[in-house]
Image (cartoon, coloured by chain):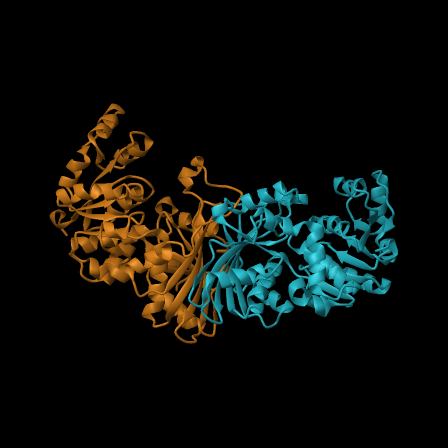
Chain colours: A cyan, B orange
Amino acid sequence: MNASSRTRVAVNGYGVIGKRVADAVVRQEDMELAGVSDISADWRSRIVTQKGYRLYGAASEHAEAMQNAGLAVAGTLEDLLGAADVVVDCTPKRVAAKNVDLYRQKGVKFIVQGGEKHAVTGHSFVAEASYKDALGRDSTRVVSCNTTSIVRTLTALKHAGLLRRARGTLLRRATDPWESHLGGIMNTLVPEPEIPSHQGPDAQSVDPALDVVTMAVKVPETLAHLHYWAVQLTRAADKEEILDAFRSSPRIALIRMADGLTAINTVKELMADLGRPHDNLYEVALWADMLKVEGDELFYAYMVDNQAIVIPETIDAIRALAGHVQDPHESIATTNAALGIGLLTEALGGR
Amino acid sequence: MNASSRTRVAVNGYGVIGKRVADAVVRQEDMELAGVSDISADWRSRIVTQKGYRLYGAASEHAEAMQNAGLAVAGTLEDLLGAADVVVDCTPKRVAAKNVDLYRQKGVKFIVQGGEKHAVTGHSFVAEASYKDALGRDSTRVVSCNTTSIVRTLTALKHAGLLRRARGTLLRRATDPWESHLGGIMNTLVPEPEIPSHQGPDAQSVDPALDVVTMAVKVPETLAHLHYWAVQLTRAADKEEILDAFRSSPRIALIRMADGLTAINTVKELMADLGRPHDNLYEVALWADMLKVEGDELFYAYMVDNQAIVIPETIDAIRALAGHVQDPHESIATTNAALGIGLLTEALGGR
């Protein structure tokens, strides 16, 4: 593929998600990173230029502050949008909604993250469920980490004709590791005040046919979310059938207690040992040996790396909007290869 | 009631449960605390004598060590058993099983805690479900904190004719507060390796008719357990009906997010404000406003004080073995009044 046919991607907001998206974009042969826009003029933006990424100020005052801090600034967000085909908005929750007018005015396709409402783009994205609907669209919304994991796993069961309804309890990490100084780790548990929690309805924004109810609680750790599910199947099934359904998704990794992966910290250590940037776990890590089938009921638990799981989805979303890859499986396989997603399954001793 | 007709209660093991049982026994008009047996000769046993409780060494070497530490020792466990009608074994998990022969040999009725197997006594106890079966027996087993909460809540639904089956996710506190120095608070989540976890089958040891499955995970806090439930009802119901069912149990307290009880630490603070010893929460604290009914499905969450919830059950178990109170409701009401259990509901603004 020659340079001119690559999709030029802008990343607006270089935080937890934005930095991972930028790193993932530069690993794709059919994409190039047009640049990164942010508001910070401290260490966070120095890393951007050190990596060789073009840095832009979100507005002129930010570009000036960056310049005063000695950073090489390529211009403002508006300049960046002029050099991009797709912008991935990774700004904090509810900020993206205000950026959308600018993106539209500049004629740039855009992706927002799960903190925004479905209505902002009118389309919600998980590659294995809604890639085709997104083909050639002007915009989409990559749903949140929790919702992504729910749609991946339930879609796998649905495709196997096994899903009737799913009821989940979600243990949410208290805060992101890098923001731990702002508080969050407490000696308590904080239930979300409403049942159902928003993740169930949010999964239905991707696939309205899913019969799913979630309850959520904030727990005092920073590593990842952990979901527990009780699923009513369409019929009695055996365990191997269920595992095969999950194996059919290239973004569900079957892990085992018996293999020493006894808690979420050990799984993160494995990601570090695999040499993944930021120890990213892109997959849903689902305990195969813990999983239990009783007649037509299924019980299981899995881990969700809230910082990483949406990264491959975002890459696929870029490709869907760009429209040059029609087949979801092709995009997913390309993204997975570039991010080394298959290597985890290999490290786990196969599927 | 004159002194001679009171049930003489021995407490063997003055740990997290034993100390609370002893304090609860002395508040009962129909019981007297014969004494406390332990192995420690440090601050823990000094508290025993300071409270005016008779202190015994579990064996002669413990009694000697206590004496050497300047403590007033009344004798050994064997002496204590000679002065008791019922002994409550509060020794660590699996130790009680070895004490049982001694209790039988001395002709003393005995109660073991939930860490022991059902077979040790052949009877498992939760007052609202199995008081009558325990009447006049030689022994029973007060089930664990988690199991107690499960049986209380599901029995309430069952008595209202509403329970079909229940599926729960249990968040277990990492360690008890007083043992925090031994480790336990970690920046991770540790799933129990097996689904179902043992609490579901354990609830069936009290009531074999319960259709219940549990999954459990250890979380990094010390205050209490938190359970999330998805229950299949026998029919569609409205929320008030469900709340009425829970209200029918005098040991379920309906709490409200909207009343400022937004997390488990705030509930513990309320217990302290009520002046309860050790901030004990004897009730299942169930969030009424969070509870949701959707057709014939019910979703709710509640808090379980693992140190306190079995204390009223243990008092009732003593009374059931002694056999002088036939009616479970009478025993429960007596225990509750002595422990101030009604006052919580009052503080919550009524039922």
Residues B105 and B304: in front is B105
Residue B53 in which image quadrant: top left
Rendered location of residue A285, percent (x, y): 56, 53
Residue B219 visible? The answer is no
Residue B122 in which image quadrant: bottom left
Rendered location of residue A300, percent (x, y): 49, 58
Query: Residue placed at 61% from the left, 69% from the top?
Result: A204
Q: How many numbered discs, if any?
A: 0
- Relative placement, left or right, of A67 versus A17 is right
Residue B99 in which image quadrant: top left
The residue most toward the bottom is B236
- Relative placement, left or right, of B273 versus A62 is left
In the image, is residue B199 above or below residue A179?
A: below
Quarter of the image with the C terminus of chain A in it: bottom right
- Relative placement, left or right, of A93 versus B51 is right
Residues B32 and B307: in front is B307
In the image, is residue B154 above or below residue A289?
A: below
Residues A259 and B252: in front is A259
Rendered location of residue B95, percent (x, y): 27, 41
Residue B235 visible? The answer is yes
Query: Residue placed at 65% from the left, 64% from the top?
Result: A128
Quarter of the image with the N terminus of chain A in it: bottom right
In the image, is residue B107 above or below residue B70?
A: below
Rendered location of residue B81, percent (x, y): 16, 40
- Relative placement, left or right, of A47 versus A207 is right
Query: Residue placed at 69% from the left, 49% from the top?
Result: A16
